[in-house]
Amino acid sequence: MINCSHPVDFGPALASAPWSNRIRGLRANASSLDHGTLCQLGHLEEGNPDELASQYVDLRTAHPKMNVFGGCCGTDYVHVEKIGRALLAVA
């Protein structure tokens, strides 16, 4: 699984990586801000739930073996619901 990172950080690395087929799950951070900035905020940054859901769909489409999805830092039920609905819509 990939955990505690945002799709803008790891997504490009998956595009040409032969090992990416081994990844089965994703629990991304809600915010695309870099970790250093996030640590300085003093609160969890929630980012954009719709954008994150769209990024999950893009990753699932590019990596169809992924089948475990959730959220990490900054995500809440809104994010997880939007991710779930977006993934069901393309299933």
Image (cartoon, rainbow, N blue to C red):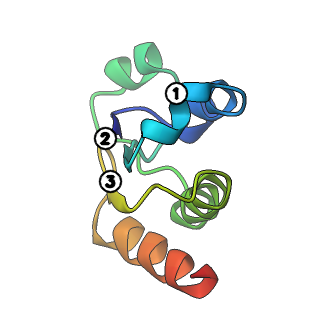
- Identified at 71% across, 33% down, the residue is 15
Q: CA distance from mark 2 to mark 1?
A: 31 Å
- Identified at 40% across, 42% down, the residue is 29
Q: Name the kind of residue labelled 2 in the image.
A: Leu
| Residue 27 on image: x %, y % | 34, 47
The answer to whether 86 appears left or right of 15 in the picture is left
Vertically, is 12 above or below 60?
Answer: above
The answer to whether 62 appears left or right of 33 in the picture is right
- Identified at 62% across, 55% down, the residue is 55
| Residue 58 on image: x %, y % | 67, 57
Frontmost of labels 2 and 1 is 1
Location of the N terminus by quadrant is top left
Which residue does the numbered mark 3 point to in the structure image? Answer: 71
Q: Name the kind of residue labelled 3 in the image.
A: Gly
Image quadrant in which you'd find residue 43? top left
Which residue does the numbered mark 2 point to in the structure image? Answer: 44
Which residue does the numbered mark 1 point to in the structure image? Answer: 19
Q: Are marks 3 and 2 in contact (CB under 8 Å)?
A: no
Q: CA distance from mark 3 to mark 2?
A: 13 Å
